[in-house]
Amino acid sequence: MKRHIIILLSAVTIFLSGCNEFLDRPSLTTMDDGNYWTSESNLRLFSNGFYANYFVGYNSTWGVDYAPLRGYYFSDDFTSSGKQSGFETQAPASRASVSETAAWMTTYAGPTWNFAWVRKSNLFLERINTMKSAYLTEEAYKHWSAVARFFRGYEYSRLVSVFGDIPYYDKVVADTELDLLYKDRDSRTLVMDKVYDDFVYVLDNMRLADGNAQYLNRYIAAGFISRFMLFEGTWQKYHLNNTEKAKKYLELAVTAANLVMNNGAYQFTSDFRSLFGSQDLAGNKEVIMYRHYDAALSITHHVASYSNLTESQGPAPNLALAKSFICADGKPYKLSTLANASKLDIKSMVATRDPRFEATFWDAPMKESATMLYACKFIDRVGVTYYGKTYPAMYGSNTNTNDYPVMRLAEVVLNWIEAKAELATMGGAAVSQSDLDKSINAIRNRPLDATAIAKGIVKTAPLNIGAIPNDPDRDADVPALLWEIRRERRMEFVYEHTRLMDIKRWKKINYMSGAQNPDILLGPWVNFPVEFPAWLVKEKENKLKVKKADGTVVTYNGTNGAEMIGYYIPESVADRDAFTDKVYLSPVGNTQISEYSDKGYKLTQTPLWN
């Protein structure tokens, strides 16, 4: 029977404190910490308990935490009808949890103030140390220590991305160790230096292969290390102006990505849509790690059903996102010489933009989208053909079974090229044409599927180091090359884990302001008399609005249907409340601060939240 490691949960729970069992009989359903740590198979079983927390994929059933589309929808890419959801404005009463259940804060794209998984990884590492001479070879000991240290680094990377400074622990803390339990926050740089050390150990000692290809191995770990080190390196540069640390972390991002890129087993041989709609990603050479779903095992999700054209999407893709897609000639639309490149209706953009536009969005306005632009990225080509019909289980409700690429080559190469480009701004080697060919241009050279080819879609021209486009919309403080690298990420990762985290680490949270970035409050250009006459009805009077190219807003009044041509204005749309730079990091709860104080200790509040 095929084993799908990514979906395994730990089948057992280790109880660390004693209890009086009935008649002192040993439990038949729980593991005994005193005699469990005796074999590699038991270590593997324990490590499986981390997988569902860190390699979430599409989540499961109706779960949305860390899931594309249904979890990652808060960024400048997406807009809802009505007033836009905002950032929190004051510290919460409480922000703590000790549960191992995945915790999720949408506006921070990360966990709450919870160190349960840190403790679990430290416990894992300590137990491995007890097995070193009696049960593990030196090679096995190093591998499993690397596994434990990888998960510890993963959790600390997430916590730091949300809170900045946090307490660092490299051991299991006893209930009696109050000075440790109630220690104040360590600096993020101290914490990330510890994470750096863990990740270096991982890259030196984790197995290149550990049996099944979907068991955690050095290549999978390296993909995530490139992600976390890119994040922290750019944060250190743009937020802390710490060039030394920025270089340190970015260099490790490059090293980790190089490990993956130098493995010839990973190649760009898949069309874009198949990465997300496939029922089985086994054998897909672009996918380094995936989560498999199987209806027979009751392992399903619901993300495809929210991509099937029938279920509503809001927040939905906005005009700012659509405008960011490069044209097929490799130029931003304002510089492109392609026919109709300047037209911002969906049909014209499908015909003129990078193939990822067609693969990500439906090719006509959809009333099911809050912006009229509907993302159908996370379903296969067949699933959308059931629109207006009855969907099979694989495309409806929470019984979807398409696989999710948890780590893929495109992310690794984009992490790599951005890290190299950032290092070049700090005295490192200049990015070469060869670097672009191995990264951005390799992505652009992906195969096209039959549906795209039938529509006349063509591959995007490669990026030439000697002719980097000078986009008139580029931020003045961002070099042209970095601007194009950032654009590539935006096109590649729509509704995935990256966008909010990217604009935070680049110190560009102002993109979330409609006052400063009005295109986030608009949909694409729609010719309602031709493309969507069904909305020129009485029910839409005084509700349906479009914005002309000159900025004039036209409201449908029942008699001016011919004038309803322009950028669609989502119904009752309003900008989110004003926010400040304090939203880059989360506050801790007032209850947690009081708990420290009650014990005679101090927990410092996140800067700017006092």
Image: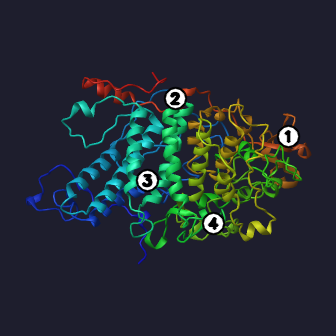
**1 or 4: mark nearer the eye:** 4
Of the two numbered discs 3 and 4 on the same chain, state the one appearing first in sequence.
3
**Picture layout, residue 313 above or below residue 572:** below
Q: Residues within 10 Å of mark 4 (few under 14, many from 20)?
A: many
- Looking at the rendered structure, the kind of residue marked 3 is Tyr
Question: Where, by quadrant of the figure, is residue 518 drawn?
Answer: top right
Q: Which residue is the extreme one toward the left?
A: 23
In this figure, which residue is indicated by the disc labeled 1? Answer: 557
**1 or 2: mark nearer the eye:** 2
- Looking at the rendered structure, the kind of residue marked 1 is Asn
Label 3 and label 1: CA atoms lie apart by: 51 Å
Label 1 and label 4: CA atoms lie apart by: 44 Å
**2 or 3: mark nearer the eye:** 2
**Picture layout, residue 273 above or below residue 112:** below
**Is 513 left or right of 126, judged from the image as shown?**
right
Label 2 and label 4: CA atoms lie apart by: 40 Å
User: Is any atom of residue 17 visible in this view?
Assistant: yes
**Whole-percent x and y of residue 265?**
54, 67
Say whether marks 3 and 4 touch (CB < 8 Å): no
- Looking at the rendered structure, the kind of residue marked 2 is Leu
Q: Secondary structure at mark 1?
A: loop
Q: Residues within 10 Å of mark 2 (few under 14, many from 20)?
A: few
Label 2 and label 3: CA atoms lie apart by: 28 Å
Of the two numbered discs 3 and 1 on the same chain, state the one appearing first in sequence.
3
In this figure, which residue is indicated by the disc labeled 4? Answer: 274
